[in-house]
Image (cartoon, grey):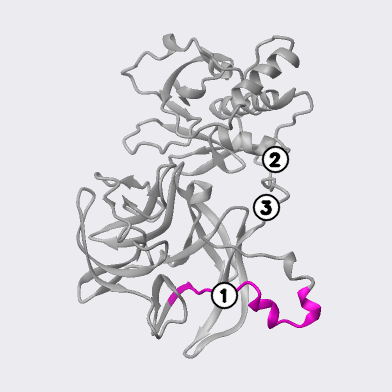
């Protein structure tokens, strides 16, 4: 067996400095593949770690200290690894042949920055080891930090326990996954997807919360497949594309699997075309805007594996990239609503006809632009969807901050500042 660690070369640490991992009583060799650093660390982090080494550990080296002598470990290897452990936030390559592709997650997010964020918020993160070949969580745990000295000691503890869990998984020991929730910072508010019933004249009844997470949620894309109803909410802040199954409509959903991870992909929308499933999303590589790069993935089934289009990102255009609703097929022609962000996010909608779509080709043509007009009470248009005879458009309007207070009874004004809602 050969194990390959994938790590960011800009943040090599001494816990990575190992020749092997003890698995079921034998030492299994490790090699390291160094990837480019995708995310900057907090300013002054390495200087703080060095100060902690001198003051808290009296000069003794720790696992979170920088590892500079890495050249001898950077030799390329032609043979494929049996197991890959990816400690970065980079997406898994579609042609990877490893039997296991393990991704440590810290409070549900990949990468060292996620572990640091949890520590800086006051606690060590919940660690999960996910096999990205099938999306299964193979182990889960919440480490203790009672003897960790400083921020560097806490990070060393987290990575030490991550290696403990990896050893157990590779030893094929039966794992017991505890039910653990991710700690949420005290100033964080839950993000909620809600539902409301409509009839022919508009909404009826009350708004019902249906899904709550600790990260941003929006754009709840729905698709029926295999007799079930599925939802993919926009969660690019969480750097994954998650699939939820409807247990009881509309208010009970369960997370079923992770379709893609380690990337920011906004407003995911799926269509079926010529025997394949195609997943569209506005891709962001950690910099720049959220609405100008279109990436496409394809698969034989809704559950994947999802492979990247040969030309990703297939399009860079602020006027016709970002999805704006479900695909529609009319008279054999495939259409997709797009967000026209030429004059800002959500400024207008476009209707784009798909002229060519395959794993290696993509062409579209915007045939119509929809802008706010006299009949629209708002100033922006965001999405366009249809369900049966009902067509739904959402957008935004300008409302003076004080106007909501003027419509409330005096008794309600004193508590109005206690709640807030935000959407992107």
The residue shown at (66%, 65%) is 420
Q: Earlier in the sequence, mark 3 or mark 1?
A: 3
Q: Earlier in the sequence, mark 1 or mark 2?
A: 2
> Gap in Å between the C-alphas at discs 1 and 2?
35 Å
x and y percent of residue 250 in the render?
56, 72
Q: Residues within 10 Å of mark 2 (few under 14, many from 20)?
A: some
> Gap in Å between the C-alphas at discs 3 and 1?
25 Å
Element under disc 1 = loop
Query: Is 216 left, or right, of 378 in this rendering?
Result: right
x and y percent of residue 238 in the render?
53, 48
Q: Tell whether label 1 touches label 3 (CB within 8 Å).
A: no
The residue shown at (55%, 81%) is 197
Element under disc 2 = loop
List the residue tagged with mark 3. Answer: 188
Element under disc 3 = loop
x and y percent of residue 349 in the render?
34, 70
> Gap in Å between the C-alphas at discs 2 and 3?
11 Å
x and y percent of residue 316 in the render?
29, 51
The residue shown at (34%, 16%) is 76
Residue that protrudes farthest toward the bottom in the picture: 201
Nearest to viewer (mark 1 / mark 2): 1
Magenta residues, start to end = 393-413
Total numbered circles: 3
List the residue tagged with mark 1. Answer: 399
- Number of the label disc, if any, that sits on residue 121: 2
């Amino acid at each position: 067996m050969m194990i390959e660690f994938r790590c960011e070369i800009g943040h090599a640490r001494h816990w990575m400095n190992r020749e092997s991992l003890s698995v079921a009583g034998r030492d299994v060799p490790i090699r390291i593949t160094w990837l480019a650093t995708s995310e900057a660390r907090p300013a002054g982090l390495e200087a703080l770690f060095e100060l902690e080494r001198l003051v808290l550990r009296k000069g003794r080296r720790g696992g979170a200290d920088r590892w500079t002598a890495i050249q001898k470990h950077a030799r390329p290897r032609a043979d494929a690894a049996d197991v890959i452990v990816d400690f970065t936030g980079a997406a898994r390559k579609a042609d990877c042949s490893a039997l296991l592709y393990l991704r440590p997650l810290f409070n549900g997010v990949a990468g060292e920055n996620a572990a640091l964020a949890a520590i800086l918020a006051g606690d060590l993160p919940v660690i999960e080891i996910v096999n990205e070949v099938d999306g299964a969580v193979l182990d889960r745990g919440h480490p203790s930090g009672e003897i960790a000295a400083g921020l560097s000691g806490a990070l060393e503890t987290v990575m030490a326990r991550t290696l403990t869990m990896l050893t157990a998984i590779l030893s094929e020991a039966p794992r017991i996954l505890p039910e653990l929730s991710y700690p949420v910072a005290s100033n964080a508010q839950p993000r909620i997807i809600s539902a409301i019933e409509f009839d022919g004249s508009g909404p009826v009844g009350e708004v019902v919360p249906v899904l709550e997470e600790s990260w941003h949620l929006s754009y709840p894309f729905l698709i029926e497949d295999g007799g079930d109803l599925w939802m993919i909410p926009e969660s690019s802040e969480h750097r994954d594309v998650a699939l939820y199954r409807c247990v009881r409509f509309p208010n009970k959903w369960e997370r079923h699997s992770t379709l893609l991870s380690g990337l920011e992909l906004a407003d995911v929308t799926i269509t079926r075309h010529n025997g394949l499933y195609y997943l569209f999303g506005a891709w962001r590589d950690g910099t720049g805007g959220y609405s100008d790069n279109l990436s496409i993935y394809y698969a034989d089934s809704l559950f994947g594996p999802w492979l990247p289009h040969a030309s990703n990102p297939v399009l860079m255009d602020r006027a016709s990239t970002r999805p704006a609703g479900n695909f529609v097929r009319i008279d054999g022609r495939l259409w997709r609503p797009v967000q026209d962000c030429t004059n800002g996010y959500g400024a207008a909608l476009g209707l784009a006809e798909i002229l060519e779509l395959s794993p290696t080709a993509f062409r579209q043509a915007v045939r119509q632009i929809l802008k706010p007009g006299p009949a629209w009470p708002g100033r922006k248009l965001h999405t366009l969807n249809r369900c049966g005879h009902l067509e739904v458009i959402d957008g935004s309007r300008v409302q003076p901050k004080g106007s909501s207070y003027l419509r409330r009874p005096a008794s309600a004004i004193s508590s109005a500042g206690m709640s807030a809602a935000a959407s992107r």
